[in-house]
Image (tube, rainbow, N blue to C red):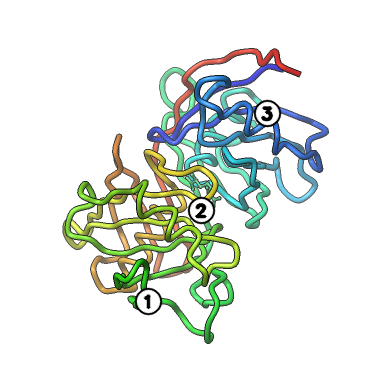
Amino acid sequence: MKFVKMHGLGNDFVFLEDKNGADKDFSQLAVKMCAPHTGIGADGIIVIVPSDKADVRMRIINADGSEAEMCGNGIRCFAKYVYDNGIIDKKEFAVETLAGIMKPKVTVGDDGKVSLVTINMGKPFTDRAQIPMEGPSGPVIDEPIEIDGKTYNITSLLMGVPHTMTYVKDVDAVDLHELGPKFETYKAFPRKTNMNFVQVIDDHTIKVHTWERGAGATLACGTGSCACAVGSFLNGFTGRSVDVQLYLGTLHIEYNEQDGNVYMTGPAAVTFTGEWLEA
Ligand SMILES: N[C@@H](CCC[C@H](N)C(=O)O)C(=O)O
């Protein structure tokens, strides 16, 4: 089984093509492939399958075997993969995901390969039931919750996948491994949540460290960056145009006033190709 290893700012994925992969269970394969010592090592696997609703379909399975509705860094890599490999021959196209149709637009460099990708990520959903989070309807903005006797003010929304954020003075001081799982499995989130710790740098810059549902601490999270840009705007900390600083670089996020959609721009890279020999 041929694979391609790719990453978006260090959020890494094993890419597979499977024409018959629409309904397959990739859970076990994802766990094996993502294992760092006995597998390839990755935050998830992404399977490219045909679509009857869009130009092509993306499936993302986390390192723990759970399937996610969407992946922001993954879809930038996906756009590069399908364009560079001639699966798609136009610079703007539509990708079916479990979170709906996403629309990538690729920028092609002098070498004919994709150098930058902008994704129309659609609209964020802010009602509690949409996240989903238990409790009365309405948005979850700067709401206090208690974990281990400590109060954290959270903002939560659905950006393809559930995201929660809390604002801190210094993200580098946060123990992601200690706190991340406690928020991920907090009782009010029936489908768990991705957890973002956010530091506001200025009114157009934030710094984010994410603990991902199903993958743990990652070097970057695309949907998380979009969610935190929207959340920072809703909290009045930033405008609609935000640079999100991550461990290995920056994503630019635009929460468009006209159409209400979120646009994410950033890089995607191929690391290596290989052949998976295990059955
Ligand atoms: N890394 C992704 C998000 C992948 C899905 C997430 N782990 C979940 O289960 O919600 C991104 O870049 O958005």
Q: State whether label 1 is within 8 Å of ligand 1.
A: no
Q: Nearer the viewer, residue 189 or 4?
A: 189
Q: Quadrant of the N terminus?
A: top right
| Of pointers 2 and 3, the one earlier in the residue sequence | 3
Instruction: Identify which amino acid the numbered label 3 is placed on.
Output: Ile
Specify which label sits upstream in the sequence, 1 or 2.
2
Q: Is residue 115 left or right of residue 200?
A: right
Circle 1 residue: 141
Of tags 1 and 2, which is closer to the observer?
1
**Gap in angstroms between the C-alphas marked 3 and 1:** 41 Å
User: Is 250 left or right of 162, judged from the image as shown?
Assistant: left
What residue is pinned by disc 3?
87
- Above/below status of 113 relative to 74: above
Q: Is residue 149 above or below residue 261?
A: below
The residue type indicated by label 1 comes to Ile
Q: Residue furthest front?
A: 149
- Is the CB atom of the residue marked by disc 2 within 8 angstroms of ligand 1's nearest atom? no
The kind of residue tagged 2 is: Asn
> Height in image: 152 above or below 89?
below
Label 2: how many Cα within 10 Å (few below 14, some 14–19, many 20+): some
Residue at image position (37%, 68%) is 147
Q: Residue furthest bottom?
A: 136
Could you give the CA–CA distance between mark 1 and mark 2, rounded to whole angstroms? 24 Å
Q: Give residue 259's position: percent from left, percent from top.
A: 48, 68
Percent from the top left, x then y, of residue 201?
A: 17, 56
Identify the residue position indicated by label 2 in the image: 120
